[in-house]
Amino acid sequence: MIHHGGCLCGAVRFACAGEPINVRICHCRNCQRATASPFFARALFSHDALTIDGETARHPSSDALDRMFCPRCGTRLFTWRNTRPVVGVALVCFDDPNAFVPTEHIWVSAKVGWVTLNDGLPQFPENPA
């Protein structure tokens, strides 16, 4: 199965082949700051599963991770792992934002206080092994 998506202005389109490795909601401070949101909901795919049409820009937010976005509209699309061949794809950037359902919360030790997690999903203080 192929899942398509893109940025707000349409300059970047992408396709992900197959099913994700996992689907998580990250509450870490880097994700909060990078997305200007209390968390980042993403599906993790292998680098090989993702094809991108259009120009993207990158910002290295750590030694392990680059954040990729559309340079025209600024939509934050991907978190590109440099230490493993995987990429996180923002769930809301898929054409069907309900295509994947998160299965757990990670980095809840950094969760903002006014966010209440009552969805019954497992919660991890950091990144589970």
Image: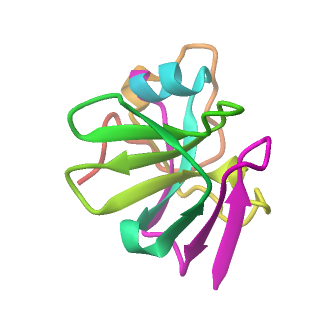
Question: 59 left or right of 11?
Answer: left
Asked where in the image residue 8 lies, by quadrant, the reply is top right
Q: Which residue lies most toward the front here?
A: 55
Q: How far across and down, in percent of the image, does residue 65 sit? A: 31, 40
- Identity of the residue drawn at 79% across and 62% down: 96
* Closer to us: 25 or 47: 47
Q: Position of residue 38 (x, y in %)?
A: 59, 24
Q: Position of residue 80 (x, y in %)?
A: 38, 49
| Number of marks in the rendered image | 0
Q: Is residue 63 left or right of residue 124?
A: left
Q: Is residue 114 above or below residue 30?
A: above
Left or right placement of residue 6 versus residue 79 in this view? right
Residue 39 versus residue 21 in the image, above or below = above
Q: Is residue 93 magenta?
A: no
Q: Quadrant of the C terminus?
A: bottom left
Q: Is residue 64 left or right of residue 5?
A: left
Residue depicted at x 50% and y 68% = 50
Relative to 50, residue 40 above or below: above
Q: Nearest the camera: 109 or 120? A: 109
What's drawn in magenta, residue-wise? 1-29
Residue shown at the point (64%, 86%) measured from the top left: 1
Q: Residue at x 64, y 80 (%)?
A: 2
Looking at this view, name the residue that lies furthest to the bottom. Answer: 1
Q: How is the image coloured?
A: rainbow
Image coords of residue 35 (percent x, y): 57, 27
Residue 36 or residue 113, whichever sits in front: 36
Is 24 one of the magenta-colored residues? yes
